[in-house]
Amino acid sequence: MSEQPYQLEAWARELLRCPVTGATLVDGVDDDGAPVLISTDPQRPLRYPVRDGIPVLLADEAR
């Protein structure tokens, strides 16, 4: 299954934070090419999947 590109409104993007560290999140791409959001926390740069254009910001989903 191929992930679809996603686009968030700027105001919504500014609200998103890592649920574990509280750090801001930046766009990234996983090893398999799927979109992810990456925590900017230098100690714990957790990655969160984006499925069907929706960021999955659950601690259990972080890698």
Image (cartoon, rainbow, N blue to C red):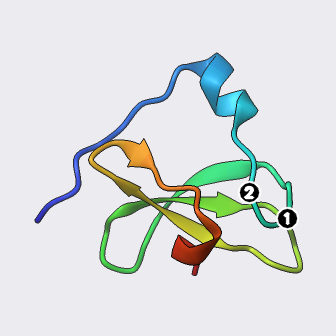
Q: Is residue 21 left or right of residue 48?
A: right
Residue for point 33% across, 64% down: 34
Q: What residue type is labelled 1?
A: Thr
Q: Count every numbered label the image shows and give the total.
A: 2
In the picture, the quarter occupied by the N terminus is bottom left
- Secondary structure beneath disc 1? loop
**What is the number of the mark on residue 18?**
2
Q: Name the residue under label 1.
A: 21
- Please say if 7 is above or below 3: above
Residue for point 75% across, 47% down: 17
Q: Quadrant of residue 62?
A: bottom right
User: How busy is the neighbourhood of tag 2: few (under 14 within 10 Å), some, or many (20 plus)?
Assistant: many
Residue for point 39% across, 80% down: 31
- Please say if 22 is above or below 6: below
CA distance for labels 2 and 1? 6 Å
Q: Percent from the top left, x then y, of residue 4? A: 22, 46
Q: What residue type is labelled 2?
A: Cys
In the picture, the quarter occupied by the C terminus is bottom right
> Are circles 2 and 1 on residues that touch, CB within 8 Å?
yes
Q: In which quarter of the image is residue 51?
A: bottom left
Q: Is residue 18 left or right of residue 13?
A: right
Q: 40 or 21, which lies in front?
A: 21
Residue positioned most to the left: 1
